[in-house]
Image (cartoon, rainbow, N blue to C red):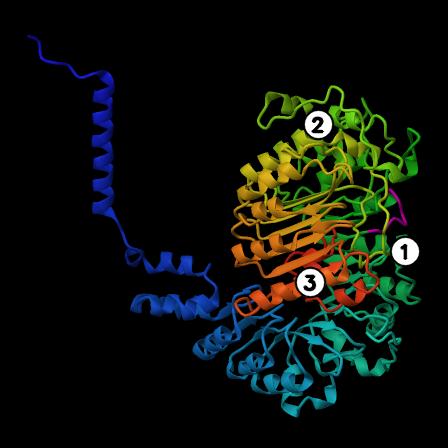
């Protein structure tokens, strides 16, 4: 008899088991604990650990970790900004343990910390840089801190109502006299501490003053020019001013700028004035300012309101400058001549890394006819790209770009040559090849795109509607070829904004209130689900904004973005598809569980139903910290919101501006605050009817950190120069 042979499958299974046992034995024998790593590796790991965790957790693991957690590379520079779990007790413990070591301390936006915690900073005698913007600070408290910090050279603070510079002690004024960097946020008309800072080289001003008090009284802006200590601008190198809407802010910034009409500092290299809206007003001394800047030259960054610019002066400024950042946002005074001024004026544009042309290049498409004087063709953009090969941040939003079939090279193909590009903002219509999206065409065949009143109110006949499938071969055929070229040429994009040319947020602050949606550009309807799915090729994408894409049908492209862009941290969606008939919500619910790294999520869409299914999907975003929902006539389920906040213990911001009664909104807000405020020190909950007449009063009570970064919609690409503040 012959011996029994094993079947081939049994032999393979035995071999597989042997290999698995061998691998496990090797792992067990070569397993290395964390204490086995070198100090250099461990220090690199610990740089990603929040400072309060180093003191309260890591330092208690063992003696080695205690020693490493006190290494100067970790303790000299402490950043508590956006460390939302850092309570008052935790911060006090950090200051107690590291007081003698800290040289740089950033507490920017730590609005939840008490005044008593801020008082502990008097222990940090070696502080050189201190950022307290957004913290609770009075003139008396500031005086005590500055009196103890004799070596301070950089300071960021808020100037709120009740601030009195006369309460500053002699010692604190002596400290201020040595400061070279000052960042000051003004909530009341004041010069703040500027008169005491006699050696300023860098001055950043944020004007957040309202024209009316909470009681409705008019705020008067009467300050003496001499009190601004204007001669102290003599050594100034950086001047930055960003204004919130309001006449008081514009009046006050003119007082700060009064000296520039007489004398421009010789070493000035950054000059930025950002005034919101399309009518920033005229400053009579603007021409003297421009002439002075032109004489000194050597500017590295420039932004001015459009009514201040004069073409001849601008050309003289650019002629002597070597800019790294230029911002001409909303500056349409020159039309297409603006880009020509940059190309012909600047001698060397290779150092330019940030360029903002938002709203200043307009190619209008009306009745199939171009307005040639307002359209910048691809030849001009090609010249710009060739002259600026090192651009990393480019903003071309708030304009119209329509490629004529058979004409010059498409804009997307031109931009694909910018190999160093990391952040980009484009109008949605700029992605189109001029080929109508078949899904959008079928859906909107009975609704003229030019009629904003009919958007979303009628449902087109769904005859021959194509079914979109993720990863299907049909996707590439439907996707705009120019858009594919753009993505293939810039695979390392980290931030992308695709914003409809006519989009206006339903929750404005820097623009007049818009209660009725404007019609989307007809060419934006060419961009649909397949183009959104193509964004999945951007494996390094961290921030994505999609606004006013009427061509979205099922939203299934969002699923592929969520599956492939695993590092996505910020997602902002607004007005996708038809406005009333929300067809993309099932796909969004399917996509959210894949967003494991998502920290900030903003959704703005009329008629949203924020029900249990939506919040259940959102609760699977394990890294989520901030949520903002904006929806005219939208609804929410209070119990679903409460369940979501219970599941996601790291969520510290929940802002919802939707429909519903004022009573229901207040009840839900109180429930969330009572339930979670004790365990989440930085909790910020604001739930309020979007169309309520007192919305403006609610906005002014919100932490500026959240309001500016997520609640208010705006294009953020190339908004400010890189590394403006430390």
On the rendered structure, is 396 left or right of 390? right
| Frontmost residue, 235 versus 1 | 1
Measure the C-alpha gap from mark 1 to mark 2.
39 Å
User: What element does badge 2 sit on?
Assistant: loop
Residue drawn at x 82%, y 70% as measured from the top left: 210
Q: Main secondary structure of the magenta part?
A: loop
Residue 310 bears which disc, if any?
A: 1
Q: Which residue is mark 2?
A: 480
Q: Is residue 719 above or below residue 532?
A: below
Percent x, y of residue 308: 88, 59
Please report whichever mark, 3 or 1, sits nearer to the chain's N-terminal start. 1
Please report whichever mark, 1 or 2, sits nearer to the chain's N-terminal start. 1
Does residue 656 show up magenta in the picture?
A: no
Does residue 332 show up magenta in the picture?
A: yes
Q: Which residue is mark 3?
A: 686
Q: Which residues are magenta?
A: 330-336
| Other residues around mark 3 within 10 Å, as few (<14) / some (14–19) / many (≥20) | many
| Frontmost residue, 603 versus 45 | 603
Please report whichever mark, 2 or 3, sits nearer to the chain's N-terminal start. 2
């Amino acid at each position: 008899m012959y011996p029994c042979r094993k079947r081939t499958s049994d032999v393979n299974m035995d071999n597989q088991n042997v290999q698995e046992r061998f691998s496990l034995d090797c792992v067990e024998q070569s397993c290395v604990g964390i204490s086995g790593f070198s100090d250099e590796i461990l220090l690199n790991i610990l740089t990603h650990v929040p400072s309060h965790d180093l003191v309260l957790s890591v330092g208690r693991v063992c003696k080695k970790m205690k020693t490493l957690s006190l290494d100067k590379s970790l303790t000299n520079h402490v950043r508590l900004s956006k460390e939302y779990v850092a309570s008052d007790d935790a911060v006090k413990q950090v200051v107690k343990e590291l007081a003698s070591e800290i040289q740089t301390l950033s507490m920017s936006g730590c609005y939840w910390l008490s005044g008593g915690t801020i008082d502990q900073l008097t222990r940090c005698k070696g502080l050189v840089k201190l950022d307290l913007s957004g913290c609770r600070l009075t003139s008396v408290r500031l005086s005590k801190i500055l009196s103890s910090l004799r070596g301070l050279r950089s300071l960021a603070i808020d100037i709120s109502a009740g601030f009195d510079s006369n309460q500053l002690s002699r010692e604190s004024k002596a400290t201020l006299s040595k400061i070279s960097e000052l960042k000051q946020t003004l909530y009341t008309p004041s010069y703040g501490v500027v008169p005491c800072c006699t050696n300023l080289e860098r001055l950043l001003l944020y004007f957040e003053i309202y024209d009316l008090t909470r009681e409705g009284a008019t705020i008067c802006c009467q300050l003496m020019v001499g009190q601004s200590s204007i001669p102290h601008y003599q050594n100034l190198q950086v001047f930055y001013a960003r204004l919130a809407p309001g006449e008081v802010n514009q009046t006050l910034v003119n007082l700060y700028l009064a000296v520039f009409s007489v004398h421009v500092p010789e070493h000035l290299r950054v000059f930025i004035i950002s005034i919101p809206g399309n009518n920033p007003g005229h400053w009579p001394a603007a021409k003297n300012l421009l002439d002075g800047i032109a004489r000194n030259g050597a500017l590295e960054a420039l932004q001015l309101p459009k009514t201040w610019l004069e073409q001849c002066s601008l050309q003289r400024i650019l002629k002597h400058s070597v800019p790294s950042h230029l911002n001409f946002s909303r500056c349409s005074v020159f039309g297409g001549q603006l880009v020509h001024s940059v190309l012909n004026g600047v001698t060397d544009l290779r150092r330019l890394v940030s360029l903002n042309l938002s709203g200043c290049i307009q190619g209008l498409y009306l009745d199939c006819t171009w307005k040639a004087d307002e359209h910048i063709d691809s030849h001009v953009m090609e010249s710009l790209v060739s002259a600026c090969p090192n651009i990393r941040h480019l903003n071309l939003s708030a304009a119209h770009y329509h490629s004529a079939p058979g004409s010059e090279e498409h804009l997307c193909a031109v931009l694909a040559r910018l190999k160093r590009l990391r952040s980009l903002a484009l109008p949605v219509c700029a992605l189109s090849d001029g080929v109508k999206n078949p899904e959008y065409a079928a859906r909107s065949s009975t609704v003229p795109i030019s009629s904003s009143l009919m958007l979303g109110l009628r449902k087109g006949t769904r005859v021959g509607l194509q079914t979109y499938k993720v990863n299907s071969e049909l996707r590439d055929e439907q996707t705009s070829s120019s858009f594919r070229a753009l993505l293939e040429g810039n695979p390392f994009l980290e931030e992308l904004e695709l914003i409809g040319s006519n989009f206006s947020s339903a929750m404005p602050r820097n623009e007049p209130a818009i209660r009725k949606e404007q019609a989307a550009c007809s060419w934006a309807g060419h961009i649909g689900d397949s183009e959104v799915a193509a964004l999945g090729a951007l494996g390094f994408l961290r921030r994505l904004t999609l606004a006013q894409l009427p061509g979205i049908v099922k939203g299934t492209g969002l699923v592929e973005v969520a599956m492939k862009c695993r590092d996505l941290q910020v997602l902002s969606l607004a007005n996708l598809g038809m406005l009333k008939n929300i067809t993309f919500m099932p796909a969004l619910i399917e996509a959210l569980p894949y967003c494991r790294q998502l920290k900030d999520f903003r959704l703005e869409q009329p008629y949203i139903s924020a029900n249990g299914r939506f919040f259940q999907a959102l609760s699977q975003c394990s890294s989520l910290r901030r949520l903002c929902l904006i929806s005219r006539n939208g609804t929410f389920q209070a119990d679903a919101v409460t369940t979501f906040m219970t599941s996601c213990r790291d969520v510290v911001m929940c802002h919802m501006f939707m429909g519903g009664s004022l009573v229901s909104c207040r009840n839900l807000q109180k429930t969330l605050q009572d339930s979670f405020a004790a365990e989440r020190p930085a909790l910020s909950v604001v739930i309020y009817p979007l169309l309520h007449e007192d919305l403006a009063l609610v906005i002014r009570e919100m932490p500026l950190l959240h309001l500016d970064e997520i609640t208010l919609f705006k294009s953020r690409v190339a908004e400010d120069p890189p590394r403006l503040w430390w």
